[in-house]
Amino acid sequence: MKTKLYLKWSFDNKKLKKTNTVSFNLPAIESCPQAGICATVCYATQGAYIYPNVKNARRFNFEYAKGKNMYVFASSLVSDLRNIKQTSIRLHDSGDFFDQNYLNAWLNVMSHFPEKQFYAYTKSLHLDFSGKPNNFTLIQSFGGKLDHLIQLDKPHSKIFNSEESRIKAGYCDGNINDSPAQRGELKIGLVYHGVKNLTENQKERFAK
């Protein structure tokens, strides 16, 4: 008998399945208050991400997180994670930490599962991550409104317009699978692979 989960988790992402990872997601852009130029090329607004079942699942999670008090939301996460066999958990292959209460709920939940490894890319660099447990790897993501807060001596990622640009800048390949993020590599390069063609201005912006 299949275990009932309170929230909607993604078990079928082809990239994440390579590392036996499950993800928890929110709607792109709407739950990313610090999105900047990245919003113009966001992969999570294209392709399979616009299918109704995918969009509805992310919408459900967002409304659940906002509509419940954070104790109820965190309790639901804990219950679900007890029934999820995967030990690698990605937060937000779409979406982000939209406020401090939501982040705090996750930090609390992570502390209940030291045997699981959590990781996330984020542009919400104004939030307080000081309570981050050891089993949470955070990757700062360029392309938002708070790029000036990114600490280059800590894990961070950039979007590039080509493999050549990524290699020239000295960033490792973050497209094949999520191992670099899970390991906390210092410089992770994500080559744009959306279905929409980049404009000349976007190509120039993501060239280095």
Image (cartoon, rainbow, N blue to C red):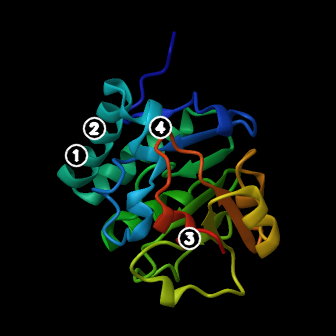
Left or right: 77 as drawn, with respect to 136: left
- For label 1, the residue is 63
The answer to whether the residue labelled 4 contacts the one labelled 2, judged by CB atoms less than 8 Å apart, is no
Label 4 close to label 1 by CB (< 8 Å) = no
- What is the spatial separation of the Cα atoms under label 4 and label 1, in whole angstroms? 17 Å
- Say which amino acid is labelled 1: Glu
Q: Residue at x 50, y 78 (%)?
A: 129
Residue drawn 56% across the image and 70% down it: 204
- As helix, strand or loop, the secondary structure at mark 1 comes to helix
Pick the front one: 34 or 111: 34
Neighbour class for label 1 at 10 Å: few (<14), some, many (≥20)?
Answer: few
User: What amino acid type should be assigned to the residue bearing mark 3?
Assistant: Glu
Residue 138 visible:
no
- The residues tagged by marks 4 and 2 sit, at their Cα atoms, a distance apart of 15 Å
Q: How crowded is mark 2: few (under 14 residues within 10 Å), some or many (20 or more)?
A: some
Indicate left or right for 149 with 134 as reference. left
Instruction: Provide the residue designation for mark 4.
Output: 80
Q: Which of marks 4 and 1 is in front?
A: 1
Question: Residue 154: x and y, percent?
Answer: 69, 81
Residue highlighted by disc 3? 204
